Image (cartoon, helix red, strand yellow):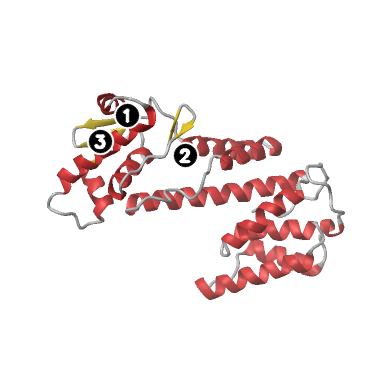
């Protein structure tokens, strides 16, 4: 958490941290006390749960005073607001990285829909730069935060995939390859990332490595999920095997240079 571009480290116990995380993740929305109880104790609250939630909100407010220098009373009036039936984190006096990220991701998708690939990839890169690690990595999550974490992570991987597809389209092959090499290793079941990885390897002439990536993906999918790769990945694998793609013999372009490249099958 930061205030006025100054990062501060504040110690907050696990349960108050869960409460604060749920409020911030839903800034501008009233969170009923019952939802906070369910998130903290996951269906098994103690008899003192309502009083404990009040304590955790107080501790969260106190932590915010250490970050932004506001008085405790001011935090209660301007940031963590008490409302009938629950609490709300105000979205009128703070900025939220996850909201900026989502807006930039949508801006990138809009740009791609209009054919502005360069503008789209720039928006995607700026969106990903806002990530400082996994969402809620230091927070004990209940069902609501876990659902939000999955949503954000799936969104992030989709943005990585779109960014790399855009870079391939622009001829920035080595930038795409660098990002994809790490991504497919971290996410061995993600077909979209593997498809882009196979594409760029194929364009750069590394057919054997592209086919190896396909077989590794297929093995993981069959072993862990009992399914075959989807049709787009299978078609690309077959095209590589048939050696019909005109890009296969393209020279290795310098990173950042624009190089005409035939359009690949859209994902």
Q: Position of residue 254 (x, y in %)?
A: 83, 47
The quadrant of the image that shows the C terminus is bottom right
Examine the rendered structure and indicate whether residue 223 appears above or below residue 15. Answer: below
Which disc is residue 87 wearing? 3
Could you tell me how far apart the alpha carbons at marks 3 and 1 are, in whole angstroms? 10 Å
Question: Is 243 situated left or right of 23 in this image?
Answer: right
Which residue does the image show at 22% across and 31% down from the upper left? 83
Which residue does the image show at 66% across and 52% down from the upper left? 179
Q: Position of residue 45 (x, y in %)?
A: 18, 54
Q: Earlier in the sequence, mark 2 or mark 3?
A: 3
For label 2, the residue is 98
Q: Nearer the viewer, residue 20 or 35?
A: 20
Q: Dot 1 lies on which element? A: loop
Q: Earlier in the sequence, mark 2 or mark 1?
A: 1
Q: Nearer the viewer, residue 67 or 189?
A: 67
Q: Is residue 266 visible?
A: no
For label 1, the residue is 79
Q: For the residue carrying disc 2, how many other residues have a C-alpha within 10 Å: few (<14), some (14-19), or many (20+)?
A: some
Q: For the residue carrying disc 3, how many other residues have a C-alpha within 10 Å: few (<14), some (14-19), or many (20+)?
A: many
Tag 2 and tag 1, C-beta contact below 8 Å = no
Which residue does the image show at 77% across and 60% down from the upper left? 202
């Amino acid at each position: 958490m930061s205030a006025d571009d100054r990062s501060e480290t504040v110690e907050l116990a696990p349960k108050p941290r869960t409460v604060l995380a749920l409020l911030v993740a839903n800034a501008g929305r009233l969170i009923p006390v019952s939802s906070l109880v369910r998130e903290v104790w996951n269906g098994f609250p103690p008899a003192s749960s309502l009083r404990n939630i009040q304590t955790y909100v107080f501790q969260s407010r106190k932590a915010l005073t250490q970050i932004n220098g506001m008085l405790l009373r001011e935090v209660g009036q301007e940031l963590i607001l008490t409302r009938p039936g629950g609490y709300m984190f105000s979205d009128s006096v703070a900025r939220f990285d996850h909201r900026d990220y989502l807006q930039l991701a949508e801006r990138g998708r809009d740009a791609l829909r209009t054919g502005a690939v360069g503008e789209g990839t720039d928006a995607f890169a700026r969106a990903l730069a806002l990530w400082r690690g996994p969402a809620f990595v230091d927070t004990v999550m209940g069902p609501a935060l876990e659902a939000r974490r999955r949503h954000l992570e799936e969104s992030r991987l989709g943005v990585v995939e779109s960014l790399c597809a855009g870079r391939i389209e622009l001829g920035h092959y080595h930038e795409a390859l660098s990002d994809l090499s790490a991504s497919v290793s971290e996410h061995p079941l993600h077909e979209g990332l593997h498809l882009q990885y196979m594409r760029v390897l194929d364009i750069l002439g590394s057919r054997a490595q592209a086919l190896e990536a396909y077989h590794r993906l297929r093995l993981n999918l069959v072993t862990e999920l009992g399914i075959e790769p989807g049709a787009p990945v299978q078609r690309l694998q077959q095209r590589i095997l048939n050696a019909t793609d005109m890009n296969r013999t393209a020279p290795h372009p310098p990173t950042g240079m624009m190089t005409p490249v035939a359009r690949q099958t859209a994902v």
